[in-house]
Each structure stands twice: as C-alpha cells, then as structure tokens.
Amino acid sequence: MRPFFARLLSKNKTEEKDPMKKFLIVGLGNPGPKYENTRHNIGFKILDELAEKREVGFEADRYGDKTSFNFKGRKFILIKPTTFMNLSGKAVRYWLEKENIAIQNLLVITDDLNLSFGTLRLKPKGSDGGHNGLKSIQELLQTTTYPRLRFGISDEFSKGRQIDYVLSEWSPEEQKILKERLETSAELILSFGTAGIQNTMNNFNGK
C-alpha cells in the first residue's frame, strides 16, 4: 500500500474516538470572476449554497478559500481550491493532512459531462473519467477510492467544443432549475456527513 493512502487509513481509529467527526468537502472549480458562473465551477457554486444556508463565509487560506461549520455533531470543512482545476490535488492533499481527516470523510464535488443536467451521483470511488481535477487528486492521493459527488452538466456541445462548453455559462433554461439543484446538493452533503454514504446514495442518487 502506498504511504500517503496508508497514513490516511491509519487515522480511522482516531477519528472514531473523536466526539466531533470531521469531514472535508472540496468543490472543484477555477478561481476568479471569469469562471464564477461556468459549468466547470459547479463545485464552487454548491459550496457557496451550503455556506449561505449555514450562514458562514469563505476566507482565503492555503491553496484555497475555506470555511467551516458544525452540524449534528459533525464538523464540515469546505474548501474551494485556488490552484486552478488541473492542480486540485494539491489542495485536497494539504487539507486532508492538516485537518487529520480520514479519506472516507473526504467528498469531492465535480461536474460531469456524462450525466444529464442537474443529475446527482454520489459514489465511494471511481475513475477520473477524463476530468483534469480528478486526475490531479488521484495522482497526489495515489488512489481512486475516495467519495465524489458528480453533478451532471450534460454534453450538449458540438465536436471539438468541449472546453468551450465546460467553460461557458449556464443557459437560461438551466438557470431556472439551477437553484433547486444547488439546494438539493447542499442537503446531500449534510446527509453524507450525518447519515453515511450508503443512505445518502439511496436517498439522492438520480434525483
């Protein structure tokens, strides 16, 4: 077993003894106003929604904007990496180690071209699916076994226009539905930390 993954697994017993379990929630995206409302930044948008619901604000920190809150005996630490998408793994690895969080308590939120718009799919592991942010995380964590929430952005683009599509803003039709989808995604994150991944998958996947 590779060293970094082994260290994360070794923290499980410690975390079980802690009355306040900690969860690291990382929404993927690119920093700056240029990318704020693009499809590729859905991870940031979901964390913004959750932070607003919990009445907390983000502040600049190492490798990302950070905030946290307590909910039902759990501590949720939210990170929006400022490394740009292709280096997302730097932020994930740093905050896992700094906060001493077990890898099963990590949740990475990303856009997915293979799912229809607004579809939510939570999984305990999986491939990077060609997503550069997930590739970076996989490379630095040395594993594909970590929970991730994929938010469908569909694949309504012509051949050779994928990059333009993911870096473009939501259509007017999508905007009408987006708020409700963000709210549901925020609820899913709270469920992940309190009800567990299996119950959350059963209650939210495909909805």
Image (spheres, rainbow, N blue to C red):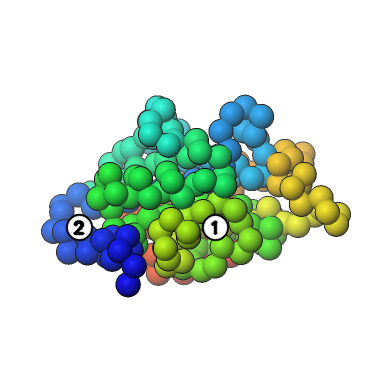
**Outermost residue toward the front in this view:** 3
Question: Which is in the foreground here, disc 1 or disc 2?
Answer: 1
Q: Which type of secondary structure does the marked residue at label 2 adopt?
A: helix
Asked whether residue 173 is in view, the answer is: no
Residue at 38 percent of width and 50 percent of height: 93
Percent x, y for residue 11? 22, 60
User: 203 left or right of 99?
Assistant: right
| Residue labelled with disc 1 | 135
| Residue labelled with disc 2 | 15
Residue at 40 percent of width and 27 percent of height: 59
Q: Amino acid at mark 2?
A: Glu
Disc 2 residue crowd, few under 14, some 14–19, many 20+, Cα 10 Å: some
Please say if 30 is above or below 24. above
Q: Amino acid at mark 1?
A: Lys
Instruction: Point out the tag, 1 or 2, that comes first from the N-terminus.
Output: 2
Percent x, y for residue 146? 42, 63
User: 73 left or right of 113?
Assistant: left
What quarter of the picture does the C terminus occupy? bottom right
What quarter of the picture does the N terminus occupy? bottom left
Please say if 157 is above or below 13. above
User: 128 left or right of 102?
Assistant: right
> In the rendered picture of this protein, how many numbered marks are placed on residues?
2
Residue at 63 percent of width and 61 percent of height: 130
Q: CA distance from mark 1 to mark 2?
A: 27 Å
Residue 207 is marked as none
User: 150 left or right of 62?
Assistant: right
